[in-house]
Image (cartoon, grey):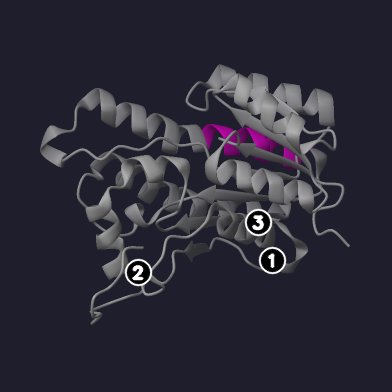
Amino acid sequence: MRRLAGKVAVVTGGARGIGLAVARAYAREGARVVVADLNAEGARAAAEDLGGGALGLVVDVADAGSVAAMIAAIVESCGRIDILMNNAGIGANTPFLETRLEDWNRILGVNLTGAFLVAQGCAREMVRVGEGGKIVNIASLSGQRGANGRAAYGSAKAGLELLTKVMAVELAEHGINVNNIAPGAIETDIARIMHDRATRAAYGRLIPMVRYGTPEEIADAAVFLCSDEARYVHGHTLNVDGGFREAGLMFKRDAPEA
């Protein structure tokens, strides 16, 4: 039996990368998937590829009106929302002393305020229907540990972890499970472009499993957290990072590139 059969699952930032992998995994497990992305053409193409009544919608998660329109369209087409994967986000690698206010506001606007707007709108629909639901936010190691260039991004993700805890406390009475996934270094198209040999070598020294993760490994964790198997997992951050967060001093001889 497919674990998400009959569920309506919304994936923001679902046109590529981790979001697309999650959308595919949800569809494989029987969910009707809504792919929501700022890239309208990408969202529609992903939905068409998924089949099974999947819906592709454009959304700017940092804009309250755009989020409200997306939720209205989902309810009109699908009647309900059972699952939210809050994945949409943007990143930057800018030193603290060089971070501009406009960049700070933009990154927090998408990664934290945007996650808040989407989660609040979807949770209100879950409460309206009265049958519970699952919300998974994409946090980050950058919100758990200090790192170069992560002043804005790391602050947004740290805030998202705390927001998840508050949501978990307040939404429990409505039967809505709320959790985080914190990916480590993941082999996405963006990582292939942005991570040079030095970056990969650094990760190779820091990750006990000595490799990047895959979007599909994040998607597998997302399916678990949205299945009935995780019905008593609540307010938790699940690191999917090859042991990166937990590692201390490691002695590796000639560590290969991750």
Q: Which residue is mark 2?
A: 207
Residue 149 is left or right of residue 222, and the answer is left
Please tell me the numbered disc located at residue 230. 1
Q: Earlier in the sequence, mark 2 or mark 3?
A: 3
Cβ–Cβ under 8 Å for marks 3 and 1: no
Measuring 55% from the left and 52% from the top, which residue is drawn there? 215
Is residue 120 inside the magenta stretch? yes
Q: Nearer the viewer, residue 146 or 205?
A: 205
Asked where in the image residue 125 lies, by quadrant, the reply is top right
- Rate crowding at label 2 as few (under 14), some (14 to 19) or many (20 or more) other CA atoms within 10 Å: many
The CA distance from mark 2 to mark 3 is 34 Å
The CA distance from mark 3 to mark 1 is 14 Å
Q: Amino acid at mark 1?
A: Ala
In the image, which residues are magenta?
116-128
Please tell me the numbered disc located at residue 172. 3
Q: Earlier in the sequence, mark 3 or mark 1?
A: 3
Q: Which of the two discs, 2 and 3, sits closer to the camera?
A: 2
